[in-house]
Image (cartoon, grey):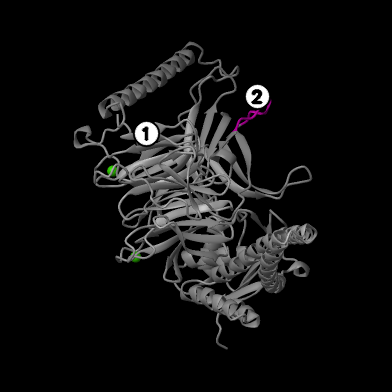
């Protein structure tokens, strides 16, 4: 069993995800971590710092080898790295909600302290995604997407089912990811290799070659204190360990200064363990059981299961032989060999007591009954699985299962259906997989011109109408009797979620118009068509009057927040000058023993301090509002991009950003509408 090569217990709590190892003097690796109450501690087991006593860095009263850095604001992120190669040592970077501090730990001085505006990015990683020797930027967003940027252009987008909380490069084009719902996994380029989902949260992921086979494993630190190392190829656990509290961070460094990198895991309670990669004689076998033992255990379990199954078959066959005519009382166990299972997906428009939904109908081909259905599907059910077991009185040869996917993404439904007879104690299990089409939450309805949405996208594709019909039938749940004629035609759908209308019209010329007030839906449809028809570049004309008007209001607000911010900053500067002069005057009065004047000055100072605190609160609120608005603007730009494909998509995003930068609002809306800045 792989044992830690060192264990430390620091008397400081560590904030999750805020741990970094750096060589702040260029030689000795030190662990830095954010702790509650706006402090960062730096653990330096190698050399006493000779630079104590200066403004920020103070010796910890609890431990001699720990220094504390006062940030005075809640720390939101922390990392270490080379900022200036000429210095030859790492800088410590500490982020708060409003500021970024770059700190020179060795000289105990600020390198810079800047005000920054955040974004809705949760995770970043650098990885050579396309294998050209240069790294691309991977960005995990709040809207469940992993985006790959080459320079300023998005070259790939992968949609996940939850917020992406962490990304880490593995090697080559392979990278690990973690979601807020307890999922971790590995991608190679756009293809997902494997994933697992836990009911715990993945606090930190890190790539590290723990079994010394030359390939990194994905190391995950979990909220329940577990750490596991999984094979990059299969997700199989090759090593695990357990801490008494949640893991705060997983990092690596040569903490013993012996020339070997250690995997370093820290818990929120300040427990730190370092692991060296397994030695050659362990042959990659890091856990206490040997591979052979595991294999034997696994095989004997399989044998047990097969024996049990065989015995069940034998018992059933015996029962059948002893009472072959006794079918009516349902004592049969074995179902007819020709029993088939049918599945059908359709739209159910619901009624008063039940909202509209997509529906999966499973039925058997004879008088057998369905005892239970297990469905495994990503992102539809809490916990990813759903069990349907009709009560004894409602057992029949078919079940209807309502399904309401929250987002328009195609989902594989993995089904296990238990089929038998009413009084069976054993059931035959049918396993099969059905794909729920991407737009299953839209019902084909008859057009109602009065409610036709004003918003639209318009584009031309060089495809025959039959191919568009094929795309429709693969991506929507069309009724069986749907018979769409040749172009020109139009189809109308109603959203089962909000009743919104969706029109898809195709002209003889190949011109397609989609009417919907839902800009995300329009984007999804365009992206879906583009991948179905293998369209590389698509320019689209669009108008979303209501959404654009909302956006215009947000942009006006952004301007207001900016000017309030400037005014408040100027006020604060004035007030700090005033404070300085009041202090000097109060001190003068004290020296002159004029206690009355001194008291008055200090009263004024007290009032001014109150004003300043109030001003700061207003500034904070203003900042939060500003962030919210900027997020909405950024989202609008992404949405405008998603209405296009390939080069036009990147052009729209770049041109929109330029328009924002030059504060040209009319230009911004022009680009969002026609897809280009030039007229
Ligand atoms: Ca590359
Ligand atoms: Ca390895």
Where residue 597 sits, quadrant-wise, is bottom right
Q: Position of residue 79 (x, y in %)?
A: 44, 54
Identify whether 458 is placed above or below 632.
below
Q: In this picture, is 29 found above or below 458?
A: above
* Ligand 1 shown in quarter: bottom left
Q: What residue would you read off at disc 2?
A: 392
Q: Is residue 394 left or right of residue 2?
A: right
Q: Does the magenta-highlighted stretch encompass residue 391?
A: yes
Q: Is residue 90 left or right of residue 619?
A: left
* Residue wearing tag 1: 7
Circle count: 2
Nearest the eye: 330 or 432: 432
Instruction: Give the residue furthest to the bottom.
Output: 679
Q: Residues within 10 Å of mark 1 (few under 14, many from 20)?
A: some
Quadrant in the rendering for residue 262: top left
Where the C terminus falls, by quadrant? Answer: bottom right
Tell me if residue 63 is in the magenta stretch.
Answer: no
Residue at image position (45%, 38%) is 63
Q: Secondary structure at mark 2?
A: helix
Relative to 301, 413 lies left or right: right
Alpha-carbon span between mark 2 and mark 1:
57 Å
SS under mark 1: strand
Q: Which residues are magenta?
A: 388-396
> What is the x, y in percent for residue 498?
71, 56
Position of the N terminus, as image quadrant, is top left
Is the Cβ of the residue at disc 2 closer than 8 Å to that at disc 1? Answer: no
């Amino acid at each position: 069993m792989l044992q830690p090569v060192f264990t430390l217990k620091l008397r400081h709590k560590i904030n999750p995800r805020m741990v970094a190892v750096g060589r702040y003097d260029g030689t000795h690796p030190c662990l830095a971590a954010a702790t509650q109450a706006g402090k960062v501690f730096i653990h330096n087991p190698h050399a006493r710092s000779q630079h104590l006593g200066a403004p920020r860095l103070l010796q910890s009263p609890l431990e001699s080898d720990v220094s504390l850095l006062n940030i005075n604001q809640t720390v939101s992120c922390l990392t270490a790295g080379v900022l200036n190669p000429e210095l030859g040592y790492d800088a410590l970077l500490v982020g708060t909600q409003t500021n970024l501090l770059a700190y020179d730990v060795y000289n105990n001085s600020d390198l810079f302290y800047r005000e920054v505006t955040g974004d809705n990015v949760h995770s970043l990683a650098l990885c050579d995604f396309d294998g050209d020797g240069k790294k691309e930027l991977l960005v995990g967003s709040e809207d469940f997407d992993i985006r790959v940027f080459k320079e300023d252009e998005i070259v790939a987008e992968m949609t996940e089912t939850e917020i992406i909380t962490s990304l880490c490069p593995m090697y080559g084009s392979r990278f690990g990811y973690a979601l807020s719902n307890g999922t971790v996994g590995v991608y190679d380029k756009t293809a997902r290799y494997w994933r697992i989902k836990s009911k715990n949260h993945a606090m930190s992921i890190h790539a590290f070659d723990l079994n010394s086979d030359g390939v990194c494993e994905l190391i995950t630190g979990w909220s329940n204190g577990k750490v596991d190392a999984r094979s990059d190829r299969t997700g199989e656990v090759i090593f695990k360990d357990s801490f008494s509290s949640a893991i705060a961070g997983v990092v690596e460094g040569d903490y013993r200064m012996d020339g070997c990198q250690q995997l370093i895991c820290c818990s929120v309670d300040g427990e730190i363990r370092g692991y060296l990669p397994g030695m050659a004689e362990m042959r990659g076998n890091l856990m206490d059981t040997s591979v052979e033992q595991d294999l034997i255990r696994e095989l004997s379990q399989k044998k047990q299961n097969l024996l049990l199954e065989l015995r069940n078959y034998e018992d059933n066959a015996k029962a059948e032989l002893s009472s072959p005519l006794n079918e009516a009382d349902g004592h049969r166990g074995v179902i007819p060999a020709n029993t088939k299972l049918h599945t059908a997906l359709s739209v159910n428009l619901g009624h008063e007591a039940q909202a509209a939904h997509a529906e999966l109908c499973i039925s058997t081909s004879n008088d057998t009954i369905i005892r239970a259905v297990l469905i495994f599907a990503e992102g539809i059910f809490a916990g990813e699985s759903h069990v349907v077991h009709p009560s004894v009185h409602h057992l029949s040869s078919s079940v209807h299962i309502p399904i309401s996917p929250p987002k328009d993404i195609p989902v594989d439904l993995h089904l296990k259906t238990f089929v038998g007879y009413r009084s069976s104690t054993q059931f035959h299990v049918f396993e099969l997989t059905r794909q729920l089409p991407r737009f299953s939450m839209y019902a084909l309805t008859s057009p109602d011109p009065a409610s036709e949405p004003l918003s639209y996208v318009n584009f031309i594709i060089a495809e025959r109408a039959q191919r568009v019909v094929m795309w429709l039938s693969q991506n929507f749940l069309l009724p069986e009797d749907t018979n769409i004629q040749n172009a020109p035609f139009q189809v109308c759908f109603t959203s089962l979620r909000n009743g919104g209308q969706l029109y898809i019209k195709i002209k003889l010329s190949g011109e397609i118009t989609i009417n919907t007030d839902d800009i995300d839906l329009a984007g999804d449809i365009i992206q879906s068509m583009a991948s179905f028809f293998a369209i590389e570049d698509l320019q689209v004309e669009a108008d979303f009057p209501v959404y654009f008007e909302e956006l215009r209001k947000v942009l006006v607000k952004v301007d207001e927040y900016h000017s309030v911010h400037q005014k408040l900053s100027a006020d604060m500067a004035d007030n700090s000058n005033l404070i300085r002069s009041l202090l000097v005057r109060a001190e003068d009065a004290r020296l002159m023993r004029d206690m009355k004047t001194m008291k008055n000055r200090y009263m004024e100072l007290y009032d001014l301090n109150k004003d300043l605190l109030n001003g700061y609160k207003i500034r904070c609120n203003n900042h939060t509002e500003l962030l919210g608005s900027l997020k909405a603007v950024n989202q609008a730009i992404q949405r405008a991009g998603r209405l296009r494909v390939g080069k036009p998509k990147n052009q729209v995003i770049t041109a929109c950003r330029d328009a924002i930068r030059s504060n040209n609002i009319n230009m911004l809306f022009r680009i969002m509408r026609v897809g280009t800045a030039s007229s």
